[in-house]
């Protein structure tokens, strides 16, 4: 396997127009899309589209997918994305588990690895475990690896790739995690909060591209989200034993099915901790210090139990305590209290629920949170995410710029 820094050198990354074309190819799927349709959807001239698609074919990222009957003239040649032309890795560093996924250009998960992890234990051990899982995942695998996206609990600084005083794992404060992994792996690495990564993945699944150069029918030829995460992170380049990934808990049959995420939503993730990812007007909202979404540390009970963050009566502490004693109804009520605050503060119209604890009893949480929100105009539903929402979203941190879904704020330093 060749470890590649090709993500920083691909021609599509040097051209916004090429990224638009590549995104339409991705969304068209196996059916493909013709050059004429690409020109119509992007507003580019046919000559410009031919030049761009020619470069993509030379780079192995696009190929012909047959011909389509035309209403006049000769049949049109259609093109499609080559998903296996490049891959990205997504890592989820949870408090008790490490998950690594390998995804292709279409966002399809092609391999996974999981292992136990003590995030609050020795930091060097955790970094070595993460690097080892990536190497094992890629052993004998794809030649072009665009990079590694990492999602972990906050707080952290997504620009510098440095965690802060992570709740329950303060030893991470000031550790240059992004640079450490990049140096060990020799590929670009991006770091973000776990809930931000999951929210980005959800938004890219559900939102159609909008704005100049995108036709109204882009949903048919190339749907996908027009999410441009605010102030995205700059990427830098730089073994433990695998266990068979456990099947994630399924939502109960009576729980509502999530519709595609709208332009504004809150993703609430309840697992080993509690946090939120916020998408406002189609934009992933991080805040200038990646501090947005520390949902679990709202104080709602002044004389409540002590939270690992140091405060008393945080929603996370109350919610996890209820879960520990088996009172999921109370946990849902506490979660709903925070959700109602978000709805009133931000005027969002959808709350997506995820995380292993929620999905193990989705109907209970949907009913409980919905009752506390108390607004029929706000949909409370399980998140329509993949099996590993944080890890898959972390991989999208790497892929999104390739398809024009992020505005880069700086060039990558390459190993």
Image (cartoon, helix red, strand yellow):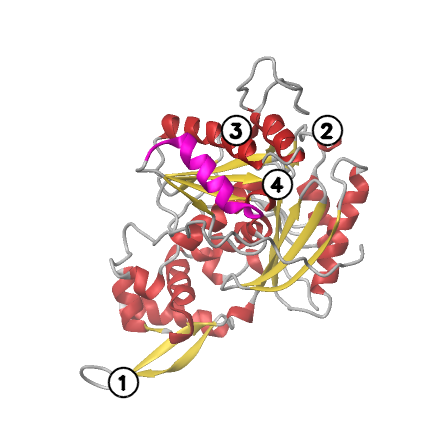
In the picture shown, does residue 323 fall above or below 389?
above
| Sequence-earlier tag: 2 or 1 | 1
Dot 3 lies on which element?
helix
Q: Are marks 1 and 3 in contact (CB under 8 Å)?
A: no
| Sequence-earlier tag: 1 or 4 | 1
Can residue 249 be seen here? The reply is: yes
Distance between mark 2 and mark 1 Cα atoms: 62 Å
How far across and how far down the image is residue 124, in percent?
80, 41
Q: Which mark is residue 271?
A: 4
How far across and how far down the image is residue 103, in percent?
57, 61
Q: Which residues are magenta?
A: 359-375
| Predominant SS along the magenta part | helix
How far across and how far down the image is residue 225, in percent?
39, 52
Q: Is residue 137 left or right of residue 314?
A: right
| Sequence-earlier tag: 3 or 2 | 2
The image quadrant that residue 144 belongs to is bottom right
How packed mark 3 is, by other alpha carbons closer than 10 Å (few <14, some 14-19, many 20 or more), is many
Q: Nearer the viewer, residue 277 or 377?
A: 377
Q: Are marks 1 and 4 in contact (CB under 8 Å)?
A: no
The residue drawn where x is 47% and y is 48% is 383
How packed mark 1 is, by other alpha carbons closer than 10 Å (few <14, some 14-19, many 20 or more), is few
Q: Are marks 2 and 1 in contact (CB under 8 Å)?
A: no
């Amino acid at each position: 396997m060749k470890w590649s820094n090709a993500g920083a050198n691909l021609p599509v990354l040097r051209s916004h127009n090429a990224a638009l074309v590549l995104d339409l190819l991705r969304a068209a799927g196996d059916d493909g899309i013709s050059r004429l349709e690409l020109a119509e959807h992007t507003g580019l001239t046919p000559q410009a589209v031919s030049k761009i698609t020619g470069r993509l074919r030379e780079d192995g990222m696009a190929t012909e997918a047959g011909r389509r009957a035309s209403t006049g003239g000769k049949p049109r040649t259609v093109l499609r994305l080559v998903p296996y032309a490049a891959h990205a890795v997504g890592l989820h560093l949870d408090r008790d588990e490490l998950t690594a996924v390998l995804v292709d250009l279409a966002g399809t998960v092609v391999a996974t690895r999981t292992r136990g992890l003590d995030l609050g234990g020795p930091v060097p051990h955790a970094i070595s475990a993460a690097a080892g899982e990536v190497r094992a995942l890629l052993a004998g695998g794809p030649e072009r690896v665009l990079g590694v996206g990492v999602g972990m609990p906050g707080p952290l600084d997504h620009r510098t790739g440095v965690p802060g005083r992570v709740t329950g794992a303060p030893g991470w404060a000031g550790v240059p995690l992004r640079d450490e992994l990049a140096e060990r792996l020799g590929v670009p690495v991006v770091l973000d909060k776990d809930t931000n990564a999951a929210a980005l993945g959800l938004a890219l699944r559900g939102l159609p591209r909008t704005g100049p150069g995108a036709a109204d029918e882009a949903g048919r030829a190339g749907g996908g989200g027009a999410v441009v995460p605010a102030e995205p992170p700059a990427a830098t380049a730089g073994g433990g034993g695998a266990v068979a990934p456990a099947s994630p808990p399924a939502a109960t049959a009576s729980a509502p099915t999530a519709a595609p995420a709208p332009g504004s939503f809150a993703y609430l993730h309840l697992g080993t901790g509690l946090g939120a990812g916020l998408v406002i007007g189609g934009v992933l909202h991080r805040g200038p210090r990646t501090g947005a979404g520390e949902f679990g540390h709202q104080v709602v009970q002044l004389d409540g139990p002590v939270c690992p963050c140091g405060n008393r009566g945080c929603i996370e502490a109350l919610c996890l305590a209820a879960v520990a004693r088996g009172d999921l109804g109370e946990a849902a009520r506490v979660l709903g209290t925070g959700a109602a605050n978000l709805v009133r503060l931000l005027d969002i119209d959808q709350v997506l629920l995820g995380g292993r604890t929620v999905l193990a009893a989705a109907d209970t949480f949907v009913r409980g949170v919905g009752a506390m929100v108390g607004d029929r105009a706000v949909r409370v539903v399980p998140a329509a995410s993949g099996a590993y929402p944080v890890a898959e979203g972390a991989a999208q941190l790497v892929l999104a710029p390739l398809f024009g879904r992020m505005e880069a704020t700086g060039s990558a330093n390459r190993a």
